[in-house]
Image: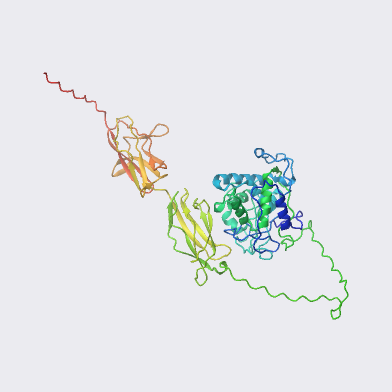
């Protein structure tokens, strides 16, 4: 929730009853329902009721405050057709003011949806969900106050999460994103806390940076965040789990669902900076973290009214009865997470595999107390960083696992991408800053250890002619097909001299000129390699073609160039006369 609330923010939060009534009054065509039971107790002053057991790895916002305003009960009129989405600068369609979304912000949501449709098609993320979250988190980036590249004109910061009326989250980014080196704050249009942005951040506008204050970056990050854990957002249960993982509150869920369905019924683009900003917050009535501005003066405190009743004997002429001191609150028992002092590697072997292959070894981490005792039921976050495109199974670069009875968390299997090089996986305790563990890993180039011809037909040619048959070989690695393996083919001088021959058979380049070394060859998905057709000059004899692959596999193929046999066929013997 923005800390620069501005003069448009007013007191008077919508209550849970109002939210429930408005949700119920929305059209019955709303797809995933918002009905549900409230569970647990309020953990934050002014915050709505949390729902336990819904978030597997904390939440995006640190349960920061959010806008509670609900959409109008009437749908936008008229509803623009999906095929006629307005563009920035185009006249806004007639309709309810609340249905308008600033042009750049709307474009960011739709671009994020398109990217997720390609990278995670099984998630079925609708851009209207991003718009709904953007509405309740920041009022669509404070009404669209963004630059052309999507960066907010001023930072949008939530309150300091110092435990005073809000969650307690000590600094994790040294103030880089939120300006606070003591406690974290939610940042940007989608209100990510820095510790979540560290692993969920994305570059949505292609400028090479991951900036939580940029609506393109933040919208794409929110999309990936909502699409983790294999969730399919076309299923109601998964949709609810994803939203609750963003902010663990039933009221939040109801509010986001209301806006999502409202936007589904029609919306339009409005100029940047002209969007409406909500006016009620989930923490209205609790301690604010920003001093009043001249445009938003504090309300004066009324003078106390005199006691209309006369003082009673022994009561001190209307003197108030002293309030007895409250007993001290009981000290809560430490949670398992509170007892963790450090993380320890639990026997992880060397992490190395070839591009495109799964790692055979899995990362294993143990949570321990200061005395070295294992701690169960602690959430451990594993995060991949580095220049490779390695992921965990399922395509994620972050995974959260709860330690078992032995205090051990076993990370999901690692899957290498096509980029080779080194990367690392960092294991950290969710919700506590303690010493973690870094696991180095390496992705090597695809390799083959064996090459064999697919045919035993002799390869022959006449001088200045072309070989009738092409060379074809199959590459394998430890008996399995070795696909996408780089190879080189060279016409060599002899078995003991692998330098390039300057005579005999040759390939042709794009201009038809003779070449006797080919690089950049690659085996196909069946491990087959078929170099281009071979030709012969006027030199006769036996020649050698050597094929080598990454991984050391080598095969030498014999080629023969000889003049055509022109000797006449022997005449048949005459039959003996009878």
Measured along the vertical axis of the image, is residue 100 above or below residue 507? below
Position in image of residue 258 (x %, y %): 68, 50
Q: Quadrant of the N terminus?
A: bottom right
Relative side of 501 to 12, left or right: left
Q: Is residue 463 visible?
A: yes
Q: Nearer the viewer, residue 462 or 498?
A: 462
Residue occupying the far left of the picture:
578
Position in image of residue 276 (x %, y %): 73, 49
Measured along the vertical axis of the image, is residue 172 above or below residue 481? below
Relative side of 156 to 502, left or right: right
Q: How is the image coloured?
A: rainbow
Q: Is residue 153 visible?
A: no
Relative side of 300 to 448, left or right: right
Residue located 54% across and 64% down the image: 378
Corner quadrant of residue 5? bottom right
Position in image of residue 157 (x %, y %): 67, 57
Measured along the vertical axis of the image, is residue 540 above or below residue 232? above
């Amino acid at each position: 929730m923005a800390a620069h609330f501005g003069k448009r923010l007013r007191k008077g939060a919508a209550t849970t009853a109002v939210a429930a009534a408005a949700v119920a009054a929305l059209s019955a065509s709303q797809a995933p329902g918002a009905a549900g039971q409230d569970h647990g107790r309020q953990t934050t002053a002014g915050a709505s009721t949390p729902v336990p057991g819904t978030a597997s790895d904390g939440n995006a916002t640190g349960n920061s405050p959010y806008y509670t305003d609900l959409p109008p009960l009437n749908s936008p009129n008229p509803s623009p057709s999906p095929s006629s989405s307005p563009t920035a600068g185009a006249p806004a369609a007639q309709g309810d003011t609340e249905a308008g979304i600033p042009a750049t912000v709307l474009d960011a949501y739709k671009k994020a949806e398109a990217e997720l449709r390609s990278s995670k098609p099984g998630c079925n993320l609708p851009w209207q969900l991003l718009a709904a979250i953007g509405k309740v988190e920041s009022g669509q980036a404070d009404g669209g106050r963004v630059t052309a590249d999507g960066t907010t004109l001023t930072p949008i910061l939530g309150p300091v999460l110092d435990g005073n009326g809000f969650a307690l989250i000590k600094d994790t980014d040294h103030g880089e994103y939120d300006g606070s080196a003591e406690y974290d704050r939610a940042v940007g249009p989608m209100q990510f806390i820095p510790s979540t942005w560290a692993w969920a951040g994305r570059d949505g506008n292609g400028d090479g940076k991951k900036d939580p204050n940029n609506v393109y970056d933040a919208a794409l990050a929110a999309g990936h965040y909502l699409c983790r854990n294999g969730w399919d957002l076309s299923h109601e249960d998964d949709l609810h789990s994803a939203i609750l993982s963003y902010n663990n509150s039933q009221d939040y869920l109801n509010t986001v669902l209301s806006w999502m369905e409202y936007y589904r019924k029609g919306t339009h683009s409005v100029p940047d900076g002209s969007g409406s900003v909500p006016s009620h917050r989930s923490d209205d009535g609790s301690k604010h973290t920003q001093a009043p501005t001249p445009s938003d003066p504090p309300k004066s405190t009324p003078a106390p009214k005199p006691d209309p009743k006369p003082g009673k004997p022994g009561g001190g002429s209307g003197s108030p009865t002293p309030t007895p001191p409250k007993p001290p609150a009981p000290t809560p028992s430490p949670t398992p997470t509170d007892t963790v002092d450090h993380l320890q590697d639990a026997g992880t072997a060397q992490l190395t595999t070839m591009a495109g292959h799964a790692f055979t070894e899995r990362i294993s981490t143990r949570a321990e107390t200061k005395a070295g005792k294992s701690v169960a039921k602690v959430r451990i976050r594993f995060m991949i960083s580095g220049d490779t495109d390695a992921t965990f199974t399922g395509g994620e670069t972050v995974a959260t696992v709860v330690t078992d009875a032995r205090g051990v968390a076993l990370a999901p299997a690692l899957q290498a991408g096509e980029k080779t090089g080194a990367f690392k996986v960092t294991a950290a305790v969710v919700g506590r800053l303690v010493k973690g563990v870094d696991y180095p890993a390496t992705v090597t180039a695809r390799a083959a250890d064996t090459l064999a011809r697919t045919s035993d037909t002799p390869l022959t040619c006449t001088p200045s002619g072309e070989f009738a048959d092409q060379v074809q070989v199959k590459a394998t690695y430890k008996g399995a097909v070795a696909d996408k393996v780089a190879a080189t083919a060279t016409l060599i001088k002899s078995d003991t001299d692998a330098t390039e021959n300057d005579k005999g058979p040759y390939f042709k380049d794009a201009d038809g000129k003779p070449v006797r070394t080919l690089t950049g060859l690659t085996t196909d998905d069946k491990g087959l390699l078929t170099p281009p057709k071979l030709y012969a000059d006027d030199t006769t004899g036996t020649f050698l073609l050597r094929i080598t692959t990454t991984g050391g596999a080598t095969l030498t193929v014999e080629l023969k160039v000889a003049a055509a046999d022109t000797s006449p066929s022997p005449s048949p013997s005459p039959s003996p006369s009878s």
